[in-house]
Image: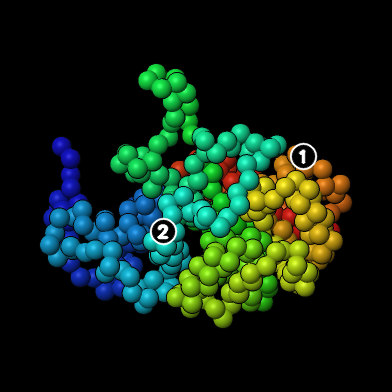
């Protein structure tokens, strides 16, 4: 026999209104009763069902009229101001309403790589699904609703099918949490540079998760620059976040003064191999000693397919991530067993 949330409330003599102190006490008591081995799974459950934008949906499943809410009830700035997850979810929803579903613009010149691990991204079988905007759960729901397909038929009318290739040009919200909480040290007083900031996901993540003094996004597409600027103004991030409409090779002073440089799959789909090699050598010459570089994919992966002439071990040294032991990250992971495998191609380096 299934038990509804309403049944649970009735059986537990549920008190409708708790003070913050009472709620904290009850939650602490509940956590004390849970097997420590199940802490992360329980926190993942809370994240999945009760944190924005799922919070309103969770209340609505209770079936009590008193709890009938809509997502509009949680749109106020006061509610989300101090909740990084809620802020990022709200920003993602705003962006979804302003750009096409695949998060690409006609003004972009996306190039299918001719070599490397993404050389199989034939436009005919590749779908752009932005990970900052759509989680794995979102994708599952879209597939179930018939709005997105996972497979294509190799010969119409048969069962000879293959999966579509999904590609994202943004960092996922879980990835952002991983970078700024597990990979990087405290960034108070530091400058963070995102090369090819596009939708601005890395900028928003740096803002909500760090105390970086300056967060700079360099983006060559003017439409994306306007989108980022609008989001930054709406969420009052403009005191620390700056957007530069430029090519990275024309921002030498910014590159030289940045303490953290983030490169998320930034060149492969937009530049020829010759242009990529030129920019990597520009970065090699201008990123200062002691600065941290965060890349996806790993520099070693990129350079194995790109003849830059740069010796990786003479330029940077890898910094070990804490992802394998971090319980905090697992709060946001859909499956704690996938923490290590999910982000193996995100790496952090210190410039020598």
Image-based side of 342 in relation to 137, left or right: right
Residue 139 x/y as whole percent: 40, 44
Residue 127 is marked as: none
Q: Which residue is mark 2?
A: 96
Question: Which residue in the protein does label 1 denote?
Answer: 304
207 in relation to 134, above or below: below
Which is more toward the observer, 153 or 60? 153
What's the residue at 52%, 35% (across, down)? 124
| Above/below status of 290 relative to 312 | below
- The answer to whether 208 is drawn above or below residue 101 in the figure is below
Q: Residue at x 79, y 64 (%)?
A: 287
Q: Residues within 10 Å of mark 2 (few under 14, many from 20)?
A: some
Structural distance between the alpha carbons of marks 2 and 1: 35 Å
Total marks placed: 2
Secondary structure of the residue carrying numbered label 2 = helix
Residue at 59% over, 46% down: 343
Give the side of residue 136 with respect to residue 304, left or right: left
Residue at point 54%, 65% (across, down): 223
Does residue 280 appear in the picture of this structure? no
The image position of residue 17, as x and y in percent, is: 20, 70
Position of 27 compared to 256: left or right?
A: left
| Image quarter hosting the N terminus | top left
Are dots 2 and 1 in contact, CB under 8 Å? no
Q: Position of residue 65 (x, y in %)?
A: 12, 62
- Quadrant of the rendered image containing residue 207: bottom right
In front here: 279 or 341?
A: 279
Q: Is residue 183 visible?
A: yes
In the picture, residue 82 is in which quadrant? bottom left
Dot 1, how many residues are within 10 Å of its Cα: few (below 14), some (14-19), or many (20+)? few
Q: Nearer the viewer, residue 202 or 181?
A: 202
- Sequence-earlier tag: 2 or 1: 2
Q: Considering the image in quadrants, where does the C terminus appear?
A: bottom right
């Amino acid at each position: 026999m299934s038990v509804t949330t309403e049944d649970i409330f009735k059986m537990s003599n549920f008190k409708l209104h708790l003070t913050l102190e009472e709620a904290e006490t009850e939650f602490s008591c509940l956590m004390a009763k849970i097997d420590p081995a199940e802490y992360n799974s329980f926190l993942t459950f809370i994240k999945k069902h009760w944190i924005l934008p799922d919070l309103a949906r969770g209340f609505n499943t209770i079936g009590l009229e008193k709890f009938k809410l809509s997502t509009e009830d949680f749109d106020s700035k006061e509610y989300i101001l101090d909740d990084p997850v809620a802020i990022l979810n709200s920003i993602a929803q705003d962006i979804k309403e302003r750009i096409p579903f695949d998060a690409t613009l006609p003004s972009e010149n996306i190039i299918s790589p001719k070599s490397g691990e993404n050389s199989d991204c034939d436009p005919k079988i590749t779908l752009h699904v932005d990970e900052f905007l759509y989680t794995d759960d979102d994708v599952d729901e879209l597939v179930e609703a018939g709005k997105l397909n996972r497979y294509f038929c190799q010969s119409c009318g048969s069962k000879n099918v293959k999966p579509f290739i999904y590609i994202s040009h943004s960092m996922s919200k879980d990835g952002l949490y991983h970078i700024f909480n597990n990979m990087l040290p405290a960034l108070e007083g530091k400058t963070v540079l995102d090369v090819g900031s596009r939708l601005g996901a890395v900028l928003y993540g740096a803002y909500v998760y760090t105390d970086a003094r300056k967060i700079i996004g360099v983006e060559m597409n003017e439409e994306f620059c306007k989108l980022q600027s609008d989001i930054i103004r709406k969420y009052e991030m403009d005191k620390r976040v700056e957007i530069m409409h430029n090519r990275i090779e024309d921002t030498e002073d910014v590159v030289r003064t940045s303490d953290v440089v983030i490169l998320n799959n930034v060149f492969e789909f937009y530049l020829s191999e010759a242009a990529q090699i030129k920019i990597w050598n520009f970065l090699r010459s201008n990123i200062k000693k002691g600065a941290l570089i965060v890349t996806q994919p790993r520099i070693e992966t990129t350079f194995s397919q790109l003849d830059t002439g740069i010796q990786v071990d003479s330029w940077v040294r890898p910094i070990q991530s804490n992802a394998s032991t971090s319980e905090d990250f697992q709060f946001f992971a859909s499956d704690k067993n996938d923490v290590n495998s999910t982000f193996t191609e995100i790496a952090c380096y210190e410039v020598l």
